[in-house]
C-alpha cells in the first residue's frame, strides 16, 4: 500500500468519511482563501490502519490518531484547533508586512 504524501505547497487534509471536524477544517480554509488537497483515508484505514498511523507519525514526528490530520507545505499542523491557531499566526504575520 502506497500512502499519498503531504503536498509540497498548500494545505493537505487527511480526511475520512463522516468526520465533522474534517468538514470544518475545509470550511475554515475556504473562508481564509487557502488552497488545499484532500486525501481520503478510508481505504488506508481499512487496508492497514497501523501502517497508515506509522506513516503519519513519521511525517508529523508525533503520534496523532484523530482526524483531520492537517499539513501545510509538508509540515504537520494538527487537527482543527491547531489549524485555527496556525492560520491566526500566519495571517497576523503577513499583516505585519
Image (tube, helix red, strand yellow):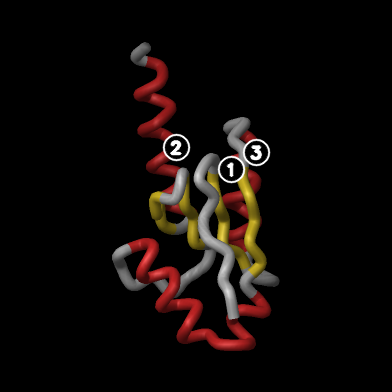
Label 3 crowd bin: few (<14), some (14–19), many (20+), radius 10 Å: few
Element carrying mark 3 = helix
Q: Residue at x 59, y 82 (%)?
A: 45
Q: Which residue is mark 2?
A: 87
Element carrying mark 2 = helix
Element carrying mark 1 = helix
Q: Residue at x 37, y 70 (%)?
A: 57
- Across and down, in percent, residue 32 comes to 58, 32
Give the distance between the C-alpha atoms of the residues marked 2 and 3, in whole angstroms: 12 Å
Nearer the observer, 57 or 28: 57
- Across and down, in percent, residue 19 comes to 63, 67
Q: Which residue is mark 3?
A: 30
Circle 2/circle 1 CB separation < 8 Å: yes
Q: Residue at x 47, y 83 (%)?
A: 51
Instruction: Reply above or below: 21 against 89.
Output: below
Residue 46 is left or right of residue 10, and the answer is: right
Tell me the number on the disc at residue 58. Answer: none
Residue 10 is left or right of residue 89, and the answer is: right
Q: Which image quadrant for residue 64? A: bottom left
Residue 7 is left or right of residue 97, and the answer is: right
Instruction: Reply above or below: 55 against 78.
Output: below
- Of callouts 2 and 1, the N-terminal one: 1
Label 1 crowd bin: few (<14), some (14–19), many (20+), radius 10 Å: some
Most extreme residue toward the front is: 2
- Across and down, in percent, residue 85 comes to 39, 42
- Which quarter of the figure is the C terminus placed in? top left
Circle 3/circle 1 CB separation < 8 Å: yes
- Which quarter of the figure is the N terminus placed in? bottom right
Give the distance between the C-alpha atoms of the residues marked 3 and 1, in whole angstroms: 5 Å
Q: Which residue is mark 1?
A: 28
Query: How many numbered badges does the structure rendering display?
Result: 3
Q: Residue at x 61, y 79 (%)?
A: 44
Amino acid at each position: 500500500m502506497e500512502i499519498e504524501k503531504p503536498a509540497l505547497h498548500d494545505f493537505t487534509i487527511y480526511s475520512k468519511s463522516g468526520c465533522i471536524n474534517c468538514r470544518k477544517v475545509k470550511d475554515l480554509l475556504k473562508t481564509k482563501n487557502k488552497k488545499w488537497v484532500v486525501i481520503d483515508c478510508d481505504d488506508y484505514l481499512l487496508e492497514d490502519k497501523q501502517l497508515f498511523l506509522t506513516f503519519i507519525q513519521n511525517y508529523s514526528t508525533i503520534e496523532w490518531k484523530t482526524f483531520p490530520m492537517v499539513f501545510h507545505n509538508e509540515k504537520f499542523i494538527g487537527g482543527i484547533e491547531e489549524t485555527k491557531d496556525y492560520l491566526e499566526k500566519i495571517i497576523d504575520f503577513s499583516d505585519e508586512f
